[in-house]
């Protein structure tokens, strides 16, 4: 867990911290940080990775308010599955199924992920070109959801959040302190 958060959250934070004095000094800049669709959508057996990417989302969403007064723009990128080396054995530490309650599901999940290697629908070269286009925009998006599978997943998550907010209205919508009862 710590290694994922150190790499995926504190890594981009440290790079950003190093460049921000220069951007503030020139009163211009654009911070583009890679997250993942997993930064918006929880996934089974991806707790550490997803937690680190959810952290990136919150950090970047809040950072924009701190840097906007200095003409520094922010974009957080949420790619789905791209045909990279993410799923090759050299890039991924596959867990051993050590807990009996999870062993069957863990084994099936690992096999499913391994079978996706080389089959991901996203083209990394096209993503790179899209990121270069975003870097040139005067008003870049705050979020860039990259890949058809990511777009559909994020839309479904947004609808789920709206439904949960509405479902909370009856019990959670009237919790303000009532000064008239004192």
Image (cartoon, rainbow, N blue to C red):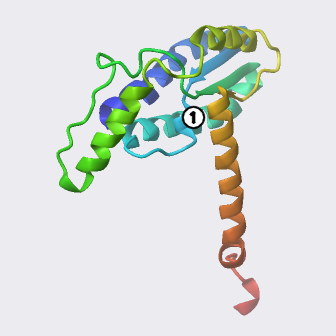
Residue 5 appears in the figure = no
Position of residue 100 relative to residue 154, above or below, is below
Residue 177 pos. (x, y %) = 68, 78
Residue 145, quarter of the rendered image: top right
x 67%, y 13%: residue: 131
x 36%, y 40%: residue: 109
| Residue picked out by circle 1 | 37
Q: Is residue 3 left or right of residue 127?
A: left
Residue 8 appears in the figure = yes
x 60%, y 14%: residue: 123
State how many labels appear. Answer: 1
Residue pushed farthest bottom? 181
Residue 56 pos. (x, y %) = 53, 33
User: Which quadrant of the rendered structure holds the C terminus?
Assistant: bottom right
Q: Is residue 51 left or right of residue 140?
A: left
Q: Is residue 95 left or right of residue 141?
A: left
Residue 66, quarter of the rendered image: top right
Front residue of 5 and 94: 94
Q: Give the secondary structure at mark 1.
A: helix
User: Which quadrant of the rendered structure holds the N terminus?
Assistant: top left
Position of residue 52 relative to residue 83, above or below, is below
Front residue of 32 and 24: 32
Q: How busy is the neighbourhood of tag 1: few (under 14 within 10 Å), some, or many (20 plus)?
A: many
Residue 97, quarter of the rendered image: top left
């Amino acid at each position: 867990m710590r290694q994922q958060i150190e790499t995926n959250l504190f890594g981009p934070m440290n790079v950003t911290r190093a460049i921000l004095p220069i951007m503030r000094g020139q009163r211009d800049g654009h911070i583009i940080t890679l997250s993942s669709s997993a930064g918006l959508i929880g996934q089974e057996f991806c707790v550490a990775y997803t937690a680190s990417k959810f952290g990136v989302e919150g950090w970047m969403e809040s950072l924009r308010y701190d840097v906007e007064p200095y003409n520094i723009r922010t974009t957080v990128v949420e790619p789905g599955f791209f045909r990279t080396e993410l799923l090759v054995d050299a890039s991924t530490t596959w867990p051993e199924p050590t807990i009996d309650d999870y062993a069957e599901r863990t084994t099936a999940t690992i096999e499913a992920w391994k079978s996706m290697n080389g089959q991901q629908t996203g083209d990394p070269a096209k993503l790179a070109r899209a990121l270069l286009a975003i870097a040139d925009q005067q008003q870049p998006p705050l979020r860039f959801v990259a890949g058809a599978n990511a777009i559909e997943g994020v839309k479904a998550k947004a609808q789920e959040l709206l439904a949960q907010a509405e479902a909370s209205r009856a019990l959670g919508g009237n919790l303000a302190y009532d000064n008239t009862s004192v």
